[in-house]
Amino acid sequence: MSEAEGDAVDEVGLHHRRPAHGDDGQGVFARWRAGGVVDLVGAVTVGEADDAEVATGAVRLSQRVIRRPRGDAKELVDDGWSRLTAVAPGRGVWAQAFGFAAANWLWDCLTLALCFMAVGEGVPWQGLLLAYGAAQLAVNIPITPGGLGVVEGSLTIALVAYGGPKEATVAAVVLYRLISFWGLLVVGWVAWAALAYQTRRQERAQTARAEAGAVA
């Protein structure tokens, strides 16, 4: 996008964002939001926009609608892109990553099956994979942290619909979530505490060596 074209887009955006006389708060908000849309659409349609210009327009739109993220949009995009391109894995690394991700889901699903055995019920294999897939989809929808409540409900409803006993299914799902969600939280907090303690020890040791060097 040339400088003249960019100025034209900015002028149009300012026209949309400029509050008219008598506008209420909702009208002003609508104009600011429209201005962000103009910036984004202008970055895509005017000239030959690259990915950075499109991303910058999207960030500006987000800043005008929800006031996040803070800072200069172009600098935020440049910083994010530099971080993304800092490491360029090859095909082998990508294959390993996908393999480990698939293994993680497989073992997690196996944990759910073993929870049914732990409560003394047979595993509803017919609907297990479907219910597990629906639960993983619920995890990635940011309704509650970690899909708390949503995962339990979707798993229970799906497994019962495929013939699982209600009481045993609820018990198995609760046990599964205790292991796969709450158990991992405990492990994560313990790991964080250990790393924080180790970091503080190293900082204190470095400070002591620096003070000893200064005295000497």
Image (cartoon, grey):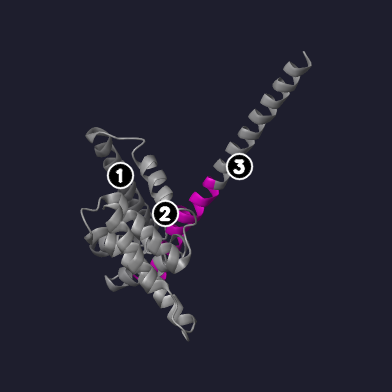
Q: Is residue 212 above or below residue 204?
A: above
6 in the magenta segment? no
Residue neighbourhood size for the residue with mark 3, other residues' Cα within 10 Å, grouped as few (<14), some (14–19), many (≥20): few
Question: Badge 2, how many Cα within 10 Å: few under 14, some, many 20+?
Answer: many
- Magenta stretch: residue 186 in it? yes
Asked if marks 2 and 3 touch (Cβ < 8 Å), the reply is no
Q: Can residue 122 be seen in this view?
A: no
| Residue at numbered disc 3 | 193
According to the picture, the residue beneath numbered tag 1 turns out to be 103
Outermost residue, bottom side: 22
**Residue range highlighted in magenta:** 165-188
Q: Which residue is drawn at 44% across and 76% down?
A: 29
Alpha carbon separation for disc pair 2 and 3: 35 Å
| Amino acid type at image mark 3 | Ala
Q: Which of 203 and 135 is in front in this view?
A: 203
Place of residue 100 in the rendered image (x, y in percent of width and height, measured from the top left) = 31, 41
Q: Which residue is drawn at 55% across and 49% down?
A: 186
Which residue is denoted by mark 2 in the rendering?
73
Q: Residue at x 49, y 50 (%)?
A: 184
Q: Disc 2 vs disc 3: which is toward the camera?
A: 2
Most distant residue in the front direction? 4
Between the residue at mark 2 and the residue at mark 1, the CA separation in whole angstroms equals: 38 Å
Q: Main secondary structure of the magenta part?
A: helix
Residue 44 visible in the snapshot: yes
Label whose residue precedes the other's in the sequence (2 or 1): 2
Height in image: 177 above or below 102? below
Local packing at callout 1 (Cα closer than 10 Å; few below 14, some 14-19, many 20+) is few
* Residue 85 place in picture, x, y as percent: 33, 39
- Mark 2 or mark 3: name the one nearer the start of the chain: 2
x, y percentage for residue 18? 43, 74
Mark 2 or mark 1, whichever is nearer to me: 2
